[in-house]
Amino acid sequence: MVPFRVFDRENKEMWIVLNYQGGGASGSYLMSREDDGDSDGELRIVRAEDIVKYRLVDFLEEADEYQS
């Protein structure tokens, strides 16, 4: 899976979706909060049906290509 960034509209936070865990609608996504600081970001597990609450920003591979 290619990691991608999503925006949490409710809390105004940017997250990186790292991978998908499980199968079907009962699966979940492992996400890390994008943080500009030196410390590691917070991790969160979000149910697959709840991922629609986030807005897709971009895929990390594509974002890296544009910055080069």
Image (cartoon, helix red, strand yellow):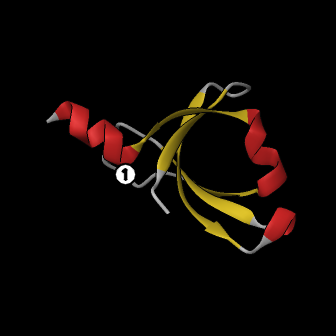
Give the quadrant of the C terminus. top left
Relative to 45, residue 9 above or below: above
Which kind of residue does numbered mark 1 sit on? Ser
Relative to 18, residue 62 above or below: above
Relative to 23, residue 7 above or below: above
Name the residue: 81% across, 46% down: 50
Picture quadrant where residue 20 is located: bottom right
Q: Is residue 40 left or right of residue 42?
A: left
Q: Nearer the viewer, residue 32 or 53?
A: 53
Relative to 40, residue 65 above or below: above
Picture quadrant where residue 56 is located: top right
The x and y percentages for residue 43 are 58, 57
Q: Which residue is mark 1?
A: 39
The x and y percentages for residue 35 are 42, 40
The x and y percentages for residue 8 are 66, 32
The x and y percentages for residue 1 are 50, 63
Q: Nearer the viewer, residue 36 or 55?
A: 55
Q: Crowding at label 1, few (<14), some or many (≥20) Cα neighbours within 10 Å? A: few
Q: Secondary structure at mark 1?
A: loop
Q: Is residue 17 left or right of residue 41?
A: right
Name the residue: 33% across, 48% down: 61
Name the residue: 74% across, 45% down: 51
